Amino acid sequence: MKLLTAILVPIFTLGSLFAQVEDMYNMPTGSAKYFQDFLNFVGEGGKTKLDVFIHVPYQDLQFVKTGKGFEAAYTVTVSVYDEEKESLLTEKVWNEKIVAYSFDEAVAAKNFNLSHRSFNLKPGTFLIRTAVMDKDSREEVSSENLYTVRDLSIKPSLSDVMLIAENRVVEGSNKIIPNITRHVFVDADGIPFFFEVYADSASKVSLELMVSNMDKEVLFRPVK
């Protein structure tokens, strides 16, 4: 299997368009809030790599004043069950720590912490539980969602589309910061996104792009 191409594209420019996409798994309910996204990419051994992203706004964490400024910490748990939630198939738990050097930084609406973990899964439908627990307040917010892991073994195939919040150059390499909230304000630069195309050998493929709203009404289609 070859990665035929990885594409980073600003899809269009429509200065008056505002889009806010909220999938059922994008934002849990609760008194505290975090955002999540699940994306399919090709994995190993005929499986699919499921990337789970967790976006936690600073404003939804409890910061404690320290000698260094203000600190917050939380634990993320991602559990993958079978569709009926009868068996826990795999689970990953990790800790995140944030240091803000001023009060204004700790409460700024634009600031957030982003983390992610990957799971190599067979294609199928799973129940995915995510949970974020603030280590100071001990408050936990969780979300359970049925999610279909796609079969990318049939070639050619496409990964899921990742919306991009920012594209940085770190130590000479491009680093993509995904847009996990999926809040999009379109300006003259358009909407950047990323996806991969997979093939068994070098070949030519044709891609057709179309943007629709939640009611499946087409908002944009490039002129051929």
Image: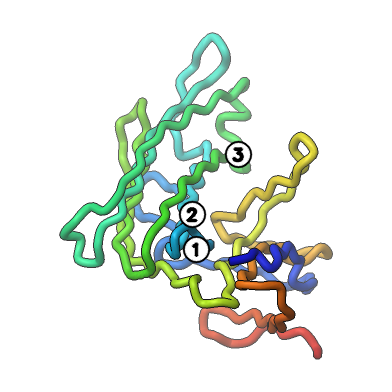
Q: Is residue 186 above or below residue 224?
A: above
Q: Nearer the viewer, residue 164 or 39?
A: 39
Residue position marked by numbered label 3 in the rendering:
111
Determine the residue positioned at 76% across, 66% down.
10
Image depth: mark 2 or mark 3 in front? 2
- Could you say which is closer to the camera, residue 110 or residue 192? 192
What separation in Å lies between label 1 and label 2 (alpha carbons)?
6 Å
Query: Which quadrant would residue 13 be assigned to in this image?
Result: bottom right
Residue located beneath label 2 in the image: 51
Kindly report the distance in space between the C-alpha atoms of the residues bearing marks 1 and 3. Answer: 27 Å
User: What colour scheme does the image use?
Assistant: rainbow
**What numbered label is drawn on residue 40?**
1
How busy is the neighbourhood of tag 1: few (under 14 within 10 Å), some, or many (20 plus)?
A: many
Residue 26 located left or right of residue 216: left
Q: Mark 2 or mark 1, which is nearer the start of the sequence?
A: 1
Residue 220 seen anywhere in this rendered image of the structure: no
Q: Is residue 89 visible?
A: yes
Helix, strand or loop for disc 1: strand
The reply to whether discs 1 and 2 touch (Cβ–Cβ < 8 Å) is yes
Give the residue displayed 36% in from the left and 26% down from the top. Answer: 136
Q: Amino acid at mark 2?
A: Asp
Q: Position of residue 192 (x, y in %)?
A: 72, 62
Q: Nearer the viewer, residue 160 or 76?
A: 160
Q: Quadrant of residue 200?
A: bottom right
Q: What amino acid does circle 1 point to?
A: Asn
Instruction: Say above or below: 75 vs 185.
Output: above
Label 2, secondary structure: give it: strand
- How many other residues sit within 10 Å of disc 3, few (<14), some (14-19) or many (≥20)? few
